[in-house]
């Protein structure tokens, strides 16, 4: 570009539009975190500080774990439906949103990557909220490294593979973040 930034118009436009499906999911997630998750975690922390009996603490920790999974599940279900709908409607919307049909594959890969990236963002943000900075940092570094590695591989393979590197990095990061979240919640 004239300002010195590197651009890949075939990729950038499709990915930007693909990530618009995240907006409703992020709103739902933030609302859930600010209400039920915060209330459950605050109740647990207050009980710990108040030296509540172990049985009560275990019950509250179990409730927090269950509520966390339920929140993530509900938002992922909503996002999954939005992603499926966006993928199905994408051929008819390509020209309407200003894309070329050659970008349809990248758009669909981006929509799927957005699903996994939301899972990664949700799980890693809860890990950080639970005061696990080292695990959070490890997740972010893994995400960065996998983005670089798989993007370079997809660039090497050629334009027909654009978007796959991002998708693989998001999917692997999502699985890893869910695993770390599960371990964190079990240890509460």
Image (cartoon, rainbow, N blue to C red):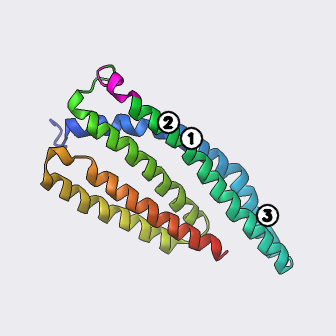
Q: Earlier in the sequence, mark 1 or mark 3?
A: 3
Q: Position of residue 57 (x, y in %)?
A: 79, 74
Q: Is residue 149 left or right of residue 54?
A: left
Residue at position x 13%, y 49% from top? 158
Residue at position x 52%, y 38% from top? 81
Tell me the magenta residue range: 89-95
Residue at position x 39%, y 57% from top? 171
Quadrant of the rendered image containing residue 68: bottom right
- The outermost residue toward the top is 96
Depicted 32 relative to depicted 96: above or below: below
What label sits on residue 82 in the rendered view?
A: 2
Reading the image, the residue beneath label 3 is 43
User: Does the magenta segment cover residue 68?
Assistant: no
Q: Is residue 21 left or right of residue 100?
A: right
| Frontmost residue, 100 versus 35 | 100
Crowdedness of circle 1 by 10 Å Cα count: few (<14), some, many (20+)?
few
**Disc 3/disc 2 C-alpha distance (Å):** 33 Å
Q: Earlier in the sequence, mark 3 or mark 2?
A: 3
Instruction: Give the secondary structure at mark 2.
Output: helix
Reading the image, the residue beneath label 1 is 78
Residue at position x 29%, y 21% from top? 95
Please report contact status of discs 1 and 3: CB closer than 8 Å, yes or no. Answer: no
Q: Position of residue 50 (x, y in %)?
A: 85, 74
């Amino acid at each position: 570009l004239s300002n010195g930034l590197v651009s890949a118009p075939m990729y950038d436009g499709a990915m930007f539009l693909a990530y618009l499906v995240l907006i409703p999911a992020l709103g739902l997630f933030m609302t859930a975190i600010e209400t039920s998750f915060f209330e459950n975690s605050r109740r647990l922390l207050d009980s710990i500080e108040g030296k509540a009996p172990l049985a009560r603490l275990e019950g509250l920790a179990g409730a927090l774990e269950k509520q966390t999974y339920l929140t993530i599940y509900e938002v992922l279900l909503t996002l999954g439906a939005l992603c499926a709908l966006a993928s199905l409607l994408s051929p008819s919307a390509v020209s309407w949103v200003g894309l070329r049909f050659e970008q349809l594959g990248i758009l669909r890969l981006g929509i799927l990557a957005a699903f996994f990236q939301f899972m990664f963002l949700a799980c890693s943000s809860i890990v950080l909220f639970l005061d696990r900075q080292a695990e959070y940092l490890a997740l972010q570094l893994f995400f960065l490294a996998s983005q670089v590695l798989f993007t370079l591989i997809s660039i090497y393979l050629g334009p027909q593979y654009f978007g796959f590197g991002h998708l693989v990095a998001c999917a692997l990061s999502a699985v890893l973040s869910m695993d770390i979240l599960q371990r964190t919640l079990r240890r509460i």
